Every structure is written in structure tokens, then in C-alpha cells.
Amino acid sequence: NPAALGAMHMYHTSRGEHLRALDFATSAVLCSPYNPNFWIHQARSLATLGRVQELETMRSKALRLMPEQRVLLEEAYGSLLEQARREKPSAPAVNDRRPP
């Protein structure tokens, strides 16, 4: 259920568990690739993690897949790219670390 995945993304984001949030956002995109909100959730997680190259790649994919959403996507990705460039890629938070 993509909506449940989106909700889990928001839950983990609110707890500062950005890698887990990214996993849920990515799953939502895979389940519902034509929903721009899920792409924006994924982009928000990537920006918070400072993952600029991945964010740029996802932006290009989203724009190719949903050209009719160009204005929405450009606005969202533009501000998130600025945020990502300010963030320093960091180690995951303690609660984001996964067992080996």
C-alpha cells in the first residue's frame, strides 16, 4: 500500500531516522511511480542525508516520468537540492544503523 509506505516515511522522518525514511519513500515510489508526492518524499530524505548526486538522478527520472508535473517537481527539487548542497553527508544516526 503506497499510502502506508508514505505514512511510514513521515513517521521515521519525524523520529530523525532518515535512512529508514528513505527506504519507505523509495518503496512508495516503486509501488506508485506516477505519484509526485512520493518522489518528493524520497527527495526530502536524500536532501537531509546530503546525497546530492542521487537527488539529481532522481530529479531527472521524475521529470522524464511525469513531464506534466514539471512545475511542482522543479520547485520541490530545486529547494531540496539547495538544502542537500548545504548538508554534509554524515554517518547515519544511531537509530538508523542497521545490524550487520
Image (cartoon, grey):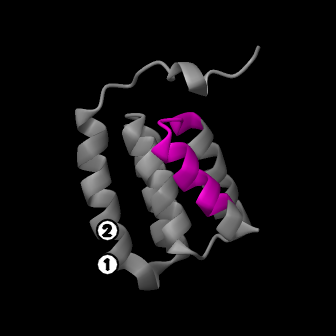
Q: What's the residue at 62%, 21% (across, down)?
A: 97
Q: Where is the C terminus found, in terms of image quarters?
A: top right
- Which residue does the numbered mark 2 point to in the structure image? 74
- The location of residue 36, given as percent across then percent down, is 50, 72
The reply to whether dot 2 and dot 1 touch (C-beta < 8 Å) is yes
- The location of residue 83, given as percent across then percent down, is 26, 44
Under circle 2, the secondary element is helix
- The amino acid pointed to by label 2 is Glu
Q: In which quarter of the image is residue 76?
A: bottom left
Q: Nearer the viewer, residue 5 or 68?
A: 5
Q: In which quarter of the image is residue 51?
A: top left
- The location of residue 28, given as percent across then percent down, is 66, 61
Task: Specify the segment rendered in magenta.
Answer: 5-19
Q: What's the residue at 37%, 77% (across, down)?
A: 70
- Which residue does the numbered mark 1 point to in the structure image? 71
How many tags in the picture? 2
Relative vertical location of residue 57 with respect to residue 49 in this rendering, above or below: below
Q: Which of 7 and 90 is in front in this view?
A: 7
